[in-house]
């Protein structure tokens, strides 16, 4: 399916807005994407590079500031080590997982990191 990611994720944030919301410069966000600490896709009619909004959470140390979901990096690494590419990773994060009773991204956002990582362990190719 062409641009399937636009169907999987309902809210996207352009890279410049991600940078502003987490208090860094665009280049740092692009480095996170390049190093696969963050996923981004071309979205919308202008094919802007965007990050799923679910990847951003309030920063408990900086009121009014956001941060990248702390558990995301390890989860992305685990899925990459299992052979998943970016789209497969996004698809897994946003598809309801029976063992979690939710999507993995929802479970990560609710703090169920160990449960998500266990669910991902069986995914290796």
Image: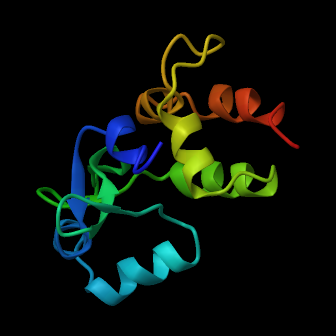
Residue at (73, 34) in percent of width and height: 120
- Residue 113 versus residue 87 in the image, above or below: above
Residue at (62, 54) in percent of width and height: 76
- Residue 109 versus residue 42 in the image, above or below: above
Residue at (62, 46) in percent of width and height: 88
Q: Name the residue at the right extreme.
A: 125
Q: Name the residue at the left extreme.
A: 64
Instruction: Report the label total.
Output: 0
- Measured as percent of width and height from the top left, residue 73 is found at 57, 58
Q: Name the residue at the front extreme.
A: 1
- Residue 96 versus residue 35 in the image, above or below: above
Q: Nearer the viewer, residue 55 or 44?
A: 44
Is residue 4 toward the left or the right of residue 98 in the image?
Answer: left
Quadrant where the C terminus is found in the figure:
top right
Q: Nearer the viewer, residue 40 or 47?
A: 47
Q: Quadrant of residue 77?
A: bottom right
- Measured as percent of width and height from the top left, residue 101 is found at 53, 10
Tell me how the rendering is colored.
rainbow
- Measured as percent of width and height from the top left, residue 121 is found at 81, 35
- Measured as percent of width and height from the top left, residue 102 is found at 48, 17
Residue at (59, 18) in percent of width and height: 97
Is residue 100 toward the left or the right of residue 3 in the image?
Answer: right
């Amino acid at each position: 399916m062409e641009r399937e990611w636009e169907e999987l994720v309902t809210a996207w944030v352009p890279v410049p807005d991600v940078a502003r919301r987490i208090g860094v410069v665009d280049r740092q966000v692009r480095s996170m994407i390049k190093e696969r600490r963050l996923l981004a896709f071309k979205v919308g009619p202008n094919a802007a590079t965007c990050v799923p909004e679910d990847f951003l959470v309030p920063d408990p140390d900086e009121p009014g500031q956001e941060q990248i979901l702390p558990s995301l990096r390890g989860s992305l690494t685990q899925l990459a080590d299992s052979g998943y590419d970016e789209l497969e990773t996004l698809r897994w994060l946003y598809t309801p997982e029976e063992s979690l009773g939710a999507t993995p991204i929802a479970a990560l956002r609710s703090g169920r990191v160990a449960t998500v990582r266990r669910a991902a362990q069986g995914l290796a190719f």
